[in-house]
Image (tube, grey):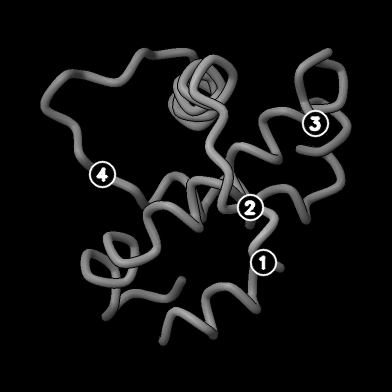
């Protein structure tokens, strides 16, 4: 998969290029927690697959209903898209052989 294909799959564009440190740093941890049963990321965890897994899971209605119960669900979604933009090369390099 190319970067263009990755961006197309997740509807990523230049508007996702802006990282809001105060919000996105926190939301990225929250996304990790959503995808790992409330666990905080360990310091040595440099995995990134959970980001695409999160966005893939938003297509599941049951998951979205639960996610939308959170007041910050929109921020989580936007941060995930910003993470795809920011970490695209890492995502592609670490998961190029897997189905993204």
Dots 4 and 3: beta carbons under 8 Å?
no
Under circle 2, the secondary element is: helix
Does the rendering let one see residue 37?
Answer: no
Q: Residue at x 64, y 75 (%)?
A: 9
In whole angstroms, how far apart are the C-alphas of marks 4 and 2?
21 Å
Dots 1 and 2: beta carbons under 8 Å?
yes
Q: Which residue is mark 1?
A: 13
In this rendering, which labeled residue sits more in front, label 2 or label 3? 2
User: First in sequence: mark 4 or mark 2?
Assistant: 2
Q: Which picture quadrant has residue 10?
A: bottom right
User: First in sequence: mark 1 or mark 4?
Assistant: 1
Q: Residue at x 39, y 14 (%)?
A: 39
Q: Is residue 43 above or below residue 1?
A: above
Q: Residues within 10 Å of mark 2 (few under 14, many from 20)?
A: some
In whole angstroms, how far apart are the C-alphas of marks 4 and 3?
23 Å
Q: Which residue is mark 4?
A: 47
Percent from the top left, x then y, of residue 72? 76, 18
In this orientation, which residue lies closer to the viewer: 44 or 2? Answer: 2
Q: Which residue is mark 2?
A: 16
Relative to residue 51, is residue 67 drawn left or right? right
Q: Is residue 13 above or below residue 69?
A: below
Q: Which residue is mark 3?
A: 74
In this rendering, which labeled residue sits more in front, label 4 or label 3? 3
């Amino acid at each position: 998969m190319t970067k263009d294909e990755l961006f197309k799959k997740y509807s990523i564009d230049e508007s996702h290029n802006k990282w809001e440190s105060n919000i996105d740093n926190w939301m990225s941890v929250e996304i990790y927690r959503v995808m790992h049963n409330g666990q905080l990321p360990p310091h040595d965890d440099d995995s990134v697959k959970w980001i695409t897994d999160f966005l893939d899971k938003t297509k599941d209605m049951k998951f979205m209903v639960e996610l939308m119960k959170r007041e910050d669900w929109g921020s989580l979604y936007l941060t995930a898209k910003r993470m795809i933009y920011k970490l695209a090369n890492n995502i592609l390099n670490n998961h190029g052989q897997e189905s993204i």
